[in-house]
Image (tube, rainbow, N blue to C red):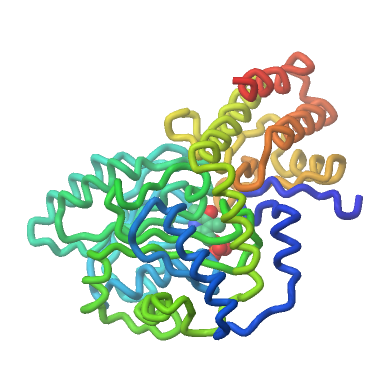
Amino acid sequence: MKDKLVLMIPGPTPVPESVLSALGRHPMGHRSADFSTILARVLEDLKWLHQTANDVLVLTASGTGTMEAGIVNFLSPGDRVLVCCNGKFAERWADMCDAYGLDAERIHGPWGKALDPEAVRRALEADTAKRVKAVIVTHSETSTGVINDLETLSRHIKAHGTALSIVDAVTSLGATSVPMDAWGLDVVASASQKGYMMPPGLGFIAVSPKAWKAYETAKLPKFYLDLGKYRAEAAHHTTPFTPAINLIFGLQVALQMMQEEGLDAIFARHSRHKTAIREAVRALGLSLYAGDDAAASPAVTAVTTQPVAAETLRSHLRKHFDIALAGGQDSLEGKIVRIGHLGFTNDRDILTVISALEASLAALGYNSFAPGAGISAATQNLAT
Ligand SMILES: *Cc1c(COP(=O)(O)O)cnc(C)c1O
């Protein structure tokens, strides 16, 4: 049915009506005082979301462009970096390091499990010559539904002394606490179409004083993504190049909504939804690709659908219930479906997706659960 499709993919995510209305205003000049007033407010609110006193800069870019900024601004050709690799997005960052001629060492961990922080600690302790300039961590690995232990990883990175932490927080920021200052993170990248309740188009990058120091000697080429320019202009509540003005209008409203809800309530909501979905999936006799609850992403849940074919199930949900789920990537294609539950998601959305999942499984001939088992498990966990 037209206009009924609900996105339950891990980005883009649903956008509230009030944000959509704000996007639809006439643009204003980006050098006007009116725009500066809006940007000033947005930049302050972004610091609140990142729990930081550091600069948080806004780019017109997707998450990948923002991570690229996180690499080219702080590193030089040939620099040694460690890349925590336990999923598809992490591999993208390793490939990006290769493209820029960095000496990227991949620390591999099995997909579907959190990366062992000890492996990173050992690699950093072995680096007595202090050649490692950065450790790249994907906090919430969207391809597998795993959250890595960023707090512990950051502790090990800080103990090294030299290396910066460069964090992909694209599906963790706005879904769970990423306290930049308390954890001592150096570079934190995210994007509007994930936890921000916004369409795609804006990237956010927060930068610590230690990273700004590295910026002074970093030699990788940069121009549009030169964060020094963004920092200088942000001090005057403007941007070096024409920003996506209408997206900033929307962002102002979205951040206001987030403040009204409060950080703790936002994180509790994501946590409740994660648990409700996981318990429902178990009650339906399916398995979770990331089986360990402690390593479960607050934003996305990957479900192994065997014996039902993942793509058949996904098409069924889309065709009969107007719900879009994501499929698996790479070797996981056809093996899992991924349910996105970040951003503008409420308890009703969770009950809806679980009901539709139950109905679809039954329609496809998978009946090894008592009718209502998934909904019952979800309801119990939503009520708490
Ligand atoms: C969505 C996502 C990105 C960003 O991808 P873009 O398509 O470039 O916005 C990066 N990392 C993770 C973990 C993501 O989920």
Query: How many numbered callouts?
Result: 0
383 w.r.t. 348: above or below: above
Location of residue 198 in the rendering, given as x and y in whole percent from the top left corner? 64, 59
Q: Residue visible at 81% across and 50% down? A: 5
Can the viewer see residue 149 in this picture? yes
Quadrant containing the C terminus in the rendered view: top right
Location of residue 332 in the rendering, given as x and y in whole percent from the top left corner? 57, 46
Q: Is residue 136 left or right of residue 173?
A: left
Q: Residue visible at 48% across and 80% down? A: 239
- Is 308 or 22 nearer to us in this picture? 22
- Is 181 or 373 nearer to us in this picture? 181
Q: Residue visible at 55% across and 40% down? A: 266
Location of residue 287 in the rendering, given as x and y in whole percent from the top left corner? 59, 28
Q: Is residue 100 left or right of residue 276?
A: left
Q: Is residue 180 left or right of residue 272?
A: left
229 w.r.t. 118: above or below: below
Q: Residue visible at 60% across and 69% down? A: 248
62 w.r.t. 51: above or below: below
73 w.r.t. 29: above or below: above
Which residue is situated farthest in the left direction here? 128
Can the viewer see residue 285 in this picture? no
- Is 183 or 79 nearer to us in this picture? 183
Picture quadrant where residue 53 is located: bottom left
Picture quadrant where residue 103 is located: bottom left
